[in-house]
Amino acid sequence: MSTAAITTTTAKTEAQGGRSNPFLLMPITLFFALLAVAVLRAPSLMSASGIGAAIIVVTPLILATYTLMASTISGRGTVDLSVGPLIGFINVTLIQLHGAGLLENPIAVFLYCMAVGALYQLIFSLIVIYVRVQPIIVSLSGYLALSGINLVILPRPGGMAPAFMAEWGYGTSIFSPILIILLLATAAWLLFTATAFYTHLRLMGSDERAAYTSGVPITIVRIGAHMISGCFAGLAAICFTALISSGDPSQGTTYTLIAVTALVLGGASLGGGRGGVFGSALGAINLYLITYVLSTFNFGTVQSFVTNLAYGAILVISLLLTLLIPVIQRRIRNFSPLLYFVALSVVVLGIILHATFDYGALGAAGAIVSGPLDMQAALTGPLEIATVSPETEALRIAAAPLVLSVLLLIVIAVFVRLAVGQSSRRTLAPAVAVVVAALVLAGAYVMAEGVRGPETEAVE
Amino acid sequence: MEKLPQISLPARILGLAIAIVLTALGVGFGFAQALSVQVIILSAIATMALFVWAWRFVIGQFLDPAATAVVAEGPSPLRTAWLQYRWPLLGLALILIAFLVLSLTVEAFFNIWNVISLIILLAILILTRTLGRQFQQNRSAFIGIMVLAGLFSVGSMNIEGFASGNNIKSMLLFASFLGLASIGQTLVALLGGLDLSIPFIIGAANVGLLYLIGLGVPPWLATLIVLAIGALFGVINGFLSYKLQGQALIVTLGTGFAISGGVQIVTSIGSAYSGNVFGTVPAWLSNIPAMNGSTFGLSFPPVIAIWALIALILILALRLTVYGRFLYALGVNRTSASRVMISEMRYWVIAYALSGFFAALTGGLLLGWSGGGFIGVGDQYLFLTLAAVVVGGTSLLGGAGGYGFTVIGVLVLQVLSSFLVGIGLDFKWQQFIFGLLILPMVALYARSPHIRTQI
C-alpha cells in the first residue's frame, strides 16, 4: 500500500518537472487541425510562394509574441500592452530617419531598431523596479503615449522603406531574409534557455519572493528580460517594415491584441514563469491559420463578421480546453510534446500529399457533386474543394491494406511501449484501454471494407 | 492650526535662494516679453511669497523631529540638507526646467496666468506629498480631488468658456457615458479580474437596439431586451472567467470578438447593407443623453442624473451592504473568503453580469446621443475604462478601491481631455499626454511595497 503511494508521488513529481510540458498539447493539436483544413481548402498554401507569403505575414506576429513572452515570463503579471505601438514607433521613426537620408546601411538599421526597442524596455523595467507601479499600468501608459506620438511622427501611412528591404516583402520564395531573421531569433532564445540566467528568470517569474530569498539578483534579471524583449521588438519592427515596405502609424497598434492572444494560445502563463518560443510561434501561426482558413470560405457580405465570431469562439474554446490538461496529465504521466508533434506531423503530411497530388491530377474543378446524398461527400464536402476521381478511388482501395498494416504496427508499438513502461507498476488499465480501442477500430474497419483487408495482408 | 516644526538654517537658506532665483527668472522673462511693469511686480511678489511660505510649511512636514536632533553630527550642513530634501528638490527642478523650456520655445507662453498655473501645480504636488500622509485610507481619492481642482482652476483661467455652464454640462455628459461604462470594470477589478468585452458589448448594444427598433419592436421592449442580453453575455463572461482563473483578459477579449461578430451577423441577415442598420430613435431615448435634454423641467441631460443616482447607490451598496463587503473580501483573499462560506462563483458571475448590463446601457444611451448605430462606437472605451479605474485608485489586483474612486478617475480624465482640447491639442497629442500622465498619477498612491518587506 505504502509503496504504491510512493510510486504515485514520484510519478507526479516526474510529470510536473522535466521535459514534459502538457501545455503544448493544445497549440500542437490546434496547429495540425488548422493546417489540415487549410491545406484541404486551399492546396496553393503548400507551394513555394504560398509558404513564402505566409512566412512574410506571420513573422512580425511571431516576433511580437516573442517580445511579449520574454517580459511575461518575468512575472508580476507583466502583459506588455505597449508592444504594438512600440513596433509602430520603431517603424515610423525608421521611415522618417530613412527619409531624412540617415540609416541607409542595413547594419545601422538593425542596430537602430534593436537599440530603440531595448531602450524603451529598459525604461519600462526601471519604472517597474524603482517606481514599483504594476507593470500593466506602465504598459497601458506606454500604449497610449506611443500610439499618440506615432501619429505625430507620421500622420498618415506613407514613406519608403530602406532600399535593401525592397525585395523582402515579395514572399515569392521560402528562404527569404525574413525567415532567416525568424530562425536566428528563435535560435538565440533557445541558446538563451541553456543559461543560468534563464533559470533565474523562470524562478523569478513563478515565485519572486522565493527567487529573492535564494539570492537571485532580481533587479538585474528583470532588466535583462526586458532588454531581450526589446531586441525582439526591434526585429519585429524590421519584419513589419519589410512586410508593408512603408511606414504606418496605426497598423502596428493592432499587434497588441493579436500578440497577447497568440501568447495565451501558445500555452504561456500570463502570471509568469511559463512560456517558450515553440508555443509562442505555434500560437501566432495558429492565429494566422484561423484567418486563412476562414478566408477560404465564402460568407458573402458578412465575411468579416464571421471571421470575428469564429476568432473569438476559437479563442474561448481553446482556453476552455486547457481545463482538460490536468485530466490528461493524470492519464498520461510523461507527455512528450516532441513525440506528439512528430506523430501529428506524419498524419498531416499525408493530408498535404493527398491535397497536393490528388488535386493536381484533378485540376481545381467541380467541388459539388449532384445526385443522391453521398455520405463521404457530405462529410468531406465542407472541407475539400475538389472531388475524388475514380482512379484515385481505385488507388485508395489498393492502398488500404498498406494503411491497415501501418495502423496495426502503430498499435503494436504503442502496446509494447506501454507494457514496458508500466511493467514496474501494477496498473495496466491504460494499456488495456488502448488495446480495446485498437480492436474496436480494426473491427470497424473490417466491417466497412469487408473481410478483404486482413486476408490480403496475410497473402502478401 | 498645529505648530510648525522649525526647519534648520541651511534648509531655510536653500529655500530663500531658490525663491530668489525663481523670482528673478520670472522678472527677467516678464521684461523680455514686454509685459506691463505692474504685472511683473505683482507676479514677482506672488511667486516669492508663495514659494517661501510653501517651502517653510511643506519642508517642515518632511522633517522628522527625531531626525533633526541627530542632524548636528551629519557630514556637513549642506549635504544633510541635500540628502533630506533631494526628492522634492529634484521634482521642483524638473518642473521648473520644463516651464523654462516651454517659456523659451513657445511664444507668449510666459504670462501671469501661466505663472499662477505653475504655482498651483507646485502647490498640488507639495500638498499631495505632505497632506496625503494624513489620509492613509483614501489617499488616492484625496489626490484625485486635488488634481481635479488644480486642473479645473488652471483650465478656467487659461481657456475662455472652460468654466461656463455649457462646457461643464458637456463634460459631465461625456463623463457619465464613461462612468457608466466603468461601473463593470470597477466591480470586476475589485475581484481581481478584467473585462475587456465592455467596448464590444457597447457597440453590439448600440447596433442591436437600433436593429430591434427598426424591426418594429416597441422601443421600451427593445431596450429591455438589449439590457437583458447584455447581462446574459456578462453572465457567460463571468462563468468563463471564473472557470479560467487568471485568464480573464483573454477570455473577455475572445467573447467580445464573438459577441461583436455575432450581433453583426444577426443584424445583417436579410439586409442589403451589411453592417449598417437603419431605424428611428424614439424621442424619449434621444432626450436622455442629449445636450439640450431636460430632466423634470430642469435643463440638463437626464443621463447625468441617472449616473449620479447609480453612483450613489453603488458607493453606498459597496460600503454598507453585506454583498459589497463580501466583494471586497473575495478580492483581498479568496481562500479565506471561501472559508467563511462566500460563494466565489456567484460573485464573479454577478459582477460580470452587472458589467454586461451597464455596457449595454451605455451602448443604448450612445445610440440616443448619436442617433445612428455604429459597431465601433465603444472602441475608445477599451482602455479608457481601464484608465479610469486605475487613475481613480482601484487596484487591478482586487480588494482595494471602490466606485467612488472611479468616479473621481472618470472626472479627472474628462476634465483633462477637455482641457487638452481647449488648449488646441488634437487627438494624437491628447493620447500622448494621457499616456504620460497616467503613470505619475498612479505612482503617487499605488506603489507596491518593496519585495524586501513581503517576505
Image (tube, coloured by chain):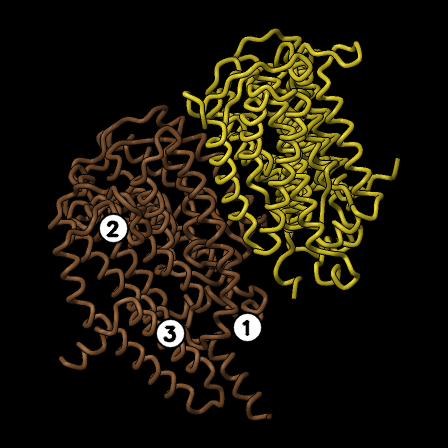
Give me the C-alpha separation between circle 1 and circle 2.
50 Å
Q: Earlier in the sequence, mark 2 or mark 3?
A: 2
Tell us which disc is closer to us: 1 or 2.
2
Q: Earlier in the sequence, mark 3 or mark 1?
A: 1
Question: Do discs 3 and 1 belong to a common subunit?
Answer: yes
Q: Examine the rendered structure and indicate whether residue A100 appears above or below residue A411.
A: above
User: What chain is the yellow one?
Assistant: B
Give me the C-alpha separation between circle 3 and circle 1.
54 Å
Residue A186 picture location, percent across and down = 30, 58
Tell me the crowding category of disc 3: few under 14, some 14 to 19, or many 20 or more residues within 10 angstroms, Cα based: few
Residue type at numbered disc 3: Val
The residue at 62%/43% (across/down) is B443
State the SS at label 3.
helix
The residue at 62%/25% (across/down) is B364
Q: Chain of mark 1?
A: A
- Numbered label attached to residue A440: 3
Residue pointed to by mark 1: A214
